[in-house]
Image (cartoon, grey):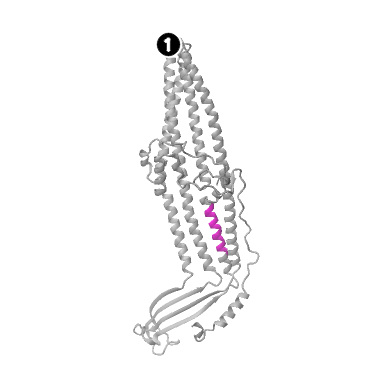
Amino acid sequence: MIKNIKGFHMPALVVLMLMLLGGCAGYKGISTSSNINDAPELPGISSEKGIWPDEKWWEKYNDSQLNRLVEETLNNNPTLGEAQARIREARAAAGIVDSDRFIQVNLGAESMFQRFTGNGSVSPEFAEKTDTVNSLKLNAAYEFDLWGKNKADYAAAMGMVKVAEIDAETARLALAAEVVQSYLHLDLVCRQEAISVEILGISERLTELRSKRYAAGLDSEQRVKYSQRDSAAVKADIRALQETQALLKNKLGALTGKGPAASVDIHAPAVSYDKGFSLPAFLPVELIARRPDIAAQKWRIEAMEKRIESAKTDFYPNLNLNAFAGFDSIGLENLLNRGSGVFGIGPAVTLPLFNGGRLKSSLAARNAEYDTAVERYNTLIINAVQEIADSIASWKSAESRISEYENITEKLAEIKKLAEINYKGGLSSNIPVLEAESGLLAEMLFMENIKIQKANAGVALITALGGGLTPAVPSENK
C-alpha cells in the first residue's frame, strides 16, 4: 500500500489538496449567453409524428439510370472519400484524448560517456576519470481525474466524431440532390429538344408553303423571310439544347467520380413524374431535426459544453502519481547489478496561482465557442424552415401554373381543330393548321419547363427536410 511507504503521507496530502483548493482562482462571471431557440411556426408543419421518409427517395422517379448514377456517386465521389477521412481523423484524435485517462508506462534506456569531476559528489574512485553513466528504467505516471477533465475532453472528442459522421451524411444528401437535379435538367432539355425538332419541321414546312405561295403571287416575300428566320432561330435553340445536354452529361460523369468519359454511357432519361412525390397535407416537425447539418450542429453544441467543463477544471489543483523502477550505474558492466537497482514513487500536485488571466481567457473562449455554435444552430433552424416554406411555395406555384397552361393548350388544341376543319373544307390553306400546331408545341415547351420546376421544388423540399418525403398520416387516422 502507498500509505506504508516511508516518507509518503496520504493524510497530509489530502490536507494539502484542500488548502490548495481553497486558494483556487475563480471563474465567477464567465458564462455562456446564448440559448437554443424553438423552430419558428410554419403553416403545414405539425408536431404530430408522421411516416418516416424513404432513404432512397430518388427511386420514386422509377428511372433505373438515375438510380445507377446516384449509387455510383455515393460510392465513388471524392467528396465522400474526404468526409470518410475526416471521420477517421476525428476518431484518431478521440483515441489520443482517451489515452490520457489511463496509466502511462514507458521504458527508458540511456548511456552517456563522460569525464567525472574531482570536485563534486561522485565517489572518489571515479573522480577525474572517464566512464559511462547508464540508466534503464520503467517509468509510470497516472493522472487522477479528480474533477472530470479527461472525461469531459473525451466526451467532447467523441462528440466531434459524431459531427464528422453526420457531416458525411450531409455530403451524401447534397450529392444525391445534385445528381437528381442535374438529371431532371437533362430530362428537361431532352424533352425540349424533341419538341423543338417538331417545331422545326413545322417551321420548314411553313417556309416551303409560303415560298410556293410567294412564287404564285399569293404571299409576300416578307412573310417568307419571317418563316426562314423562325426556322433559323429554332435550329439555334436545338444546338443550344444539345450543348446543354453534353454539359449535363459531363457533370453527371464527374459526380460519379468517373469523369466526362462516363457521359457516353448516359442516355436520355426516362423519368416518371406520375410516380414521384405529392405534397403532404402536413409535415411532421421532427423531420427538420433529422437534417444532417442541424443534427451535426447539435452535437457540436454538446461538444462545446464538454469543453467548457474541461476548461473549468483547469482552475482546480491537479494530482499526478509518478513512479519509476530500474537500474542506474556508472560503468555499463555494473548496470544490472543488484546494487544498481533504484525505484521511486510519489505524488505531484499543481495549482495555478498566477497566469496573467490565461485560464479565464481560455474559459471565456470556450464559452464564446458554445455561443457561436448555438447561434449557428438557431440560424440553421430558421433557414431550414424558410427553405421548406420556399419549396412549398414554389411547388404550389408550379402546380397552379401547370393548371393554367393546361387550359391554354386545350384552347390551342381547339384552334388547331377548327383550322383543320377549315382546311379540309377548302376554306383556308394548311398554313393556319401548321401555325396552330406550332403554337401548341411552343406552349408544351413552357409546360415541360414548369413540370421540371415543380420536380426541382420537390427535390429542394426533400433536402430541406433532411432527405426523403412521404405523405404523413393524420393522427386521427392512425
Question: Residue at position x 39%, y 85% from top?
Answer: 340
- Name the residue located 51 percent from the left edge and 79 percent from the top edge: 347
The chief SS type of the magenta part is helix
Indicate whether residue 314 is drawn in magenta.
Answer: no
In the rendering, at what x and y percent does residue 289 appear? Answer: 55, 51
What residue would you read off at disc 1? Answer: 215
Farthest residue in the top direction?
A: 217
Image position of 92 with respect to 57: above or below: below
Q: Residue extending furthest right?
A: 29
Instruction: Count up the numbered dots.
Output: 1
Judge whether 168 appears above or below 329 on screen: above
Quarter of the image where one finds residue 43: top right
Amino acid marked by disc 1? Ala
Q: Quadrant of residue 120?
A: bottom left
Q: Where residue 245 sits: x, y (%)?
A: 42, 35
- Most distant residue in the front direction: 477
Query: What residue span does the magenta drawing correspond to?
Result: 294-308
Furthest residue in direction left, as rendered: 333
Q: Which residue is drawn at 44% across and 35% down?
A: 187
Q: What element carries label 1?
A: helix
In the rendered image, residue 247, in percent from the top left (x then y), is placed at 42, 37
Q: How crowded is mark 1: few (under 14 residues within 10 Å), some or many (20 or more)?
A: few
Q: Is residue 299 magenta?
A: yes
Picture coordinates of residue 63 (x, y %)?
Answer: 41, 39
In the image, taking residue 72 as reference, residue 1 lies left or right, namely right
Q: In this view, does 159 lie above or below 199?
A: below
Between residues 114 and 425, which one lies in front from this camera angle? 425
- Horizontal placement of 415 versus 22: left or right? left
In the image, taking residue 274 as reference, residue 383 lies left or right, namely: right
